[in-house]
Image: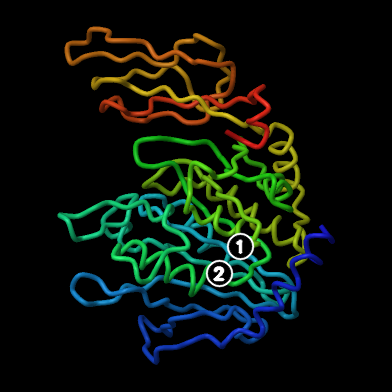
């Protein structure tokens, strides 16, 4: 713990030399509008709510992303909490809202910055992606666009570049990007993490998540977590269950993690709640770290009946689901390729060709997969 604080504190204090927060002079719903954030540029013992002005939409009107800054009573490290990069993934938004509602800045050292809904376009359309309106509309995964390029033709690239330059790239001590599984699928409490990055393993421990996918990020180029790692901010992607709902149990686990993370960074007193401590210790003992996932995808359409549940332990050739045609005739069984744990599963019987039916995670014996594959 002392090592990570000492290593990264110089990066934190380097932000003090940055230009001050840039305000437009506008007030939106009672809060000031900015075009750039300096996290050090706020009074001690305060919580500040702002809007970040984003590139203009097709009608020439700018969107605005909500940003919250909690400044402690004394200097310290910094933690960035992001949510809503996928517009249908909502549990993390509630985590961020609750953290900033409940945090006592008189006990806080350093600064916490939160975004409670980054992909405004996706949320407005209740979809995962960001919509480029030209070419009849192209759906873009915003969490593959970072660090973005403000001069690129793609509206998603411009949007990502604004988020990155104005909010995300501020030399935070650590960063957490909250997600859920996408619409139609379910995950347990789940983390993607590159364990080759200093301090990231400790971050995963603090989550108490059901499953940790050890992952170098080679398959998710342009994801915020990976870019943070590359630019010196240790980060995790924290998946909290299912899309389009607020799941109180998943939200509570994310919320409790944030305060454990703050305590580990010596930014906040650790909890003394014996129930919370016991719950976390029980979760930590059964965390599953896996290096490789095997997916069951449907080659054709139909109706899927699921037999496996999330976190079930399964074996090779075990039938996890069956596909039926519209008359109820069996088309095929879906079997596990490996011994492992079910870490993702579909929710709807309706099955389009190419749909992932399930995912099973295990620890591969292939040395090339030691850090994830």
Residue that appears at 53% across and 57% down: 95
**Which element is circle 2 on?**
loop
Q: Toward which corner of the image does residue 272 lie, by quadrant?
A: bottom right
Q: Are marks 1 and 2 in contact (CB under 8 Å)?
A: yes
Q: Mark 2 points at which residue?
A: 169
Q: Which of 77 and 142 is in front in this view?
A: 142
Q: Tell me how far mark 1 sits from mark 2, CA to CA.
A: 8 Å
Residue 350 in view (yes/no): no
Q: Where is residue 186 in the image (x, y as percent from the top left)?
A: 44, 35
Left/right of residue 268 with respect to residue 144 in the rendered view? right
Residue that appears at 67% across and 83% down: 16
Q: Where is residue 343 in the image (x, y as percent from the top left)?
A: 52, 30
Residue that appears at 73% across and 53% down: 198
Left/right of residue 43 with respect to residue 153 in the rendered view? right
Residue that appears at 43% across and 52% down: 144
Residue 339 in view (yes/no): yes
Against 349, is 18 above or below? below
Q: Toward which corner of the image does residue 228 lie, by quadrant?
A: bottom right
Q: Name the residue under label 1.
A: 231
**Which element is circle 1 on?**
loop
């Amino acid at each position: 713990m002392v090592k990570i604080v000492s290593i990264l504190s110089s990066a934190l204090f380097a932000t003090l030399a940055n230009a001050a927060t840039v305000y437009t002079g506008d007030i939106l719903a009672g809060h000031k509008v900015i075009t750039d954030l300096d996290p050090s540029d706020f009074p001690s013992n305060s919580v500040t709510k702002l809007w970040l002005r984003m590139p203009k939409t097709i009608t020439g009107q700018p969107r605005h992303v909500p940003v919250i800054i909690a400044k402690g009573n004394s200097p310290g490290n910094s933690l960035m909490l992001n949510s809503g990069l996928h517009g249908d993934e909502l549990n993390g938004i509630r985590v961020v809202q609750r953290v900033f509602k409940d945090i006592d800045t008189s006990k806080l050292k350093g600064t916490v910055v939160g975004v409670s809904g980054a992909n405004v376009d996706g949320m407005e359309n209740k979809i995962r992606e960001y919509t480029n309106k030209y070419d009849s509309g192209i759906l873009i995964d915003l969490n593959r666009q970072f660090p973005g390029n403000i001069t690129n033709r793609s509206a998603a690239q411009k949007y990502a570049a604004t988020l990155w330059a104005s909010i995300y790239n501020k030399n935070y001590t650590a960063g957490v990007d909250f997600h859920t599984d996408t619409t139609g699928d379910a995950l347990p409490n789940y983390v993607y993490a590159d364990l080759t990055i200093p301090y990231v393993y400790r971050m995963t421990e603090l989550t108490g998540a059901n499953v940790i996918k050890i992952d170098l990020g080679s398959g998710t180029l342009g994801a915020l977590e990976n870019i943070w790692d590359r630019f010196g901010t240790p980060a995790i992607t924290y998946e909290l269950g299912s899309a389009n709902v607020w799941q109180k149990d998943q939200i509570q686990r994310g919320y409790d993690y944030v305060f454990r993370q703050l305590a580990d960074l010596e930014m906040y007193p650790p909890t003394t709640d014996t129930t919370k401590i016991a719950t976390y210790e029980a979760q930590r003992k059964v965390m599953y770290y896996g290096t490789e996932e095997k997916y069951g995808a449907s080659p054709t359409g139909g109706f899927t009946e699921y037999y496996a549940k999330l976190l079930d332990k399964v074996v090779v050739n075990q039938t996890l689901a069956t596909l039926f045609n519209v008359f109820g005739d069996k088309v095929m069984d879906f079997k596990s390729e490996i011994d492992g744990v079910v870490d993702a599963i579909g929710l709807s019987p309706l099955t389009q060709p190419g749909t992932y039916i399930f995912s099973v995670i295990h620890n591969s014996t292939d040395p090339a997969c030691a850090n994830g594959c």
